[in-house]
Amino acid sequence: FIVDENKDAVEAKMQQCFENGELSIETKVNAKNGDIKDYFLFAKRFVEEGNTYLVGAGIDITDKKRVERENSKHQLMLQQLFDNAPVGITIADADNTIQQVNTSFENIFNYSEQEATGRNINDLIVPKDKKEEAQAISQSTFNGNALQTKSTRLTKDGSEIPVLIGGVPVTYEDEIIALYGIYVDISRQQQYQNKIEEALQEKEILLSELHHRVKNNLA
């Protein structure tokens, strides 16, 4: 009843059981209705009147394995989302120690994951004049509040860049165990905004000058 691709492994385990006295293995079996099910097999060796026997049983773990596969699938999807997100993301613990960063974080701040992991996020990228702000963001997030704000942070070479910051708590069994720090580089948007503001200022100056000239001409 063992599926063909698992037969050799089960037979090898049975041989080990004759030699060592115990067997345990997960395998797939052909059910009577034609389905393939996951089973946990276990057995023990015993000797009676000079003859050696194996006594064993099997537990149907099909539902358990299906749940495990679904969990693994979801975990893989979340990890791929984390790795490939177009925004910088960190995972930090209750002490603000970085556990993981994604590729976009590396690209924004020019730190490799190896350089960032194990560092305090507020020591790594927060300017001196933003320390209190950063600590308040961390504390608020660990209090269970998801938030978003605009500020500046430092790259590896000390350059200060404008970023949109998001903080999201990670909860497990009603306990906050970590936080996601999300960073969007808005340098380009800030440059556009500065140019618009400069253009508006120039327009105001021009209108003021025109108003002054018209007034003089009418005087």
Image (tube, helix red, strand yellow):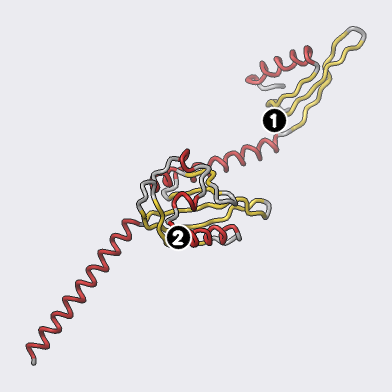
Q: Given the image, on which type of amino acid does mark 1 rest?
A: Asp
Give coordinates of residue 104: x percent, y percent: 42, 46
Mark 1 is surrounded, within 10 Å at the Cα level, by few (under 14), some (14 to 19) or many (20 or more) other residues, namely: many
Q: Residues within 10 Å of mark 2 (few under 14, many from 20)?
A: some
Q: Residue at x 81, y 16 (%)?
A: 21
The total of numbered circles placed on residues is 2
SS under mark 1: strand
Instruction: Using the image as rendered, state which of residue 126 and residue 171 is in the foreground.
Output: 126
The residue mark sitting in front, 1 or 2, is 2
Q: Is residue 102 left or right of residue 29?
A: left
Give the left or right position of residue 6, taking residue 213 as reference: right
* Quadrant of residue 41 within the rendered picture: top right
Residue beneath the point at 90% across and 7% down: 50
Q: Image quarter for residue 7?
A: top right
In the rendered view, does 200 fall on the left or right side of 59?
left
Q: Which residue is mark 1?
A: 38
Mark 1–mark 2 Cα distance, whole angstroms, equals 55 Å
Give residue 68's position: percent from left, percent from top: 65, 38
On residue 130, which mark appears? 2
Vertical relation: 1 (above or below) 118: above
Horizontal and vertical percent for residue 136?
53, 62
Quarter containing the C terminus:
bottom left
User: Could you tell whether 102 is left or right of 68 in the image?
Assistant: left
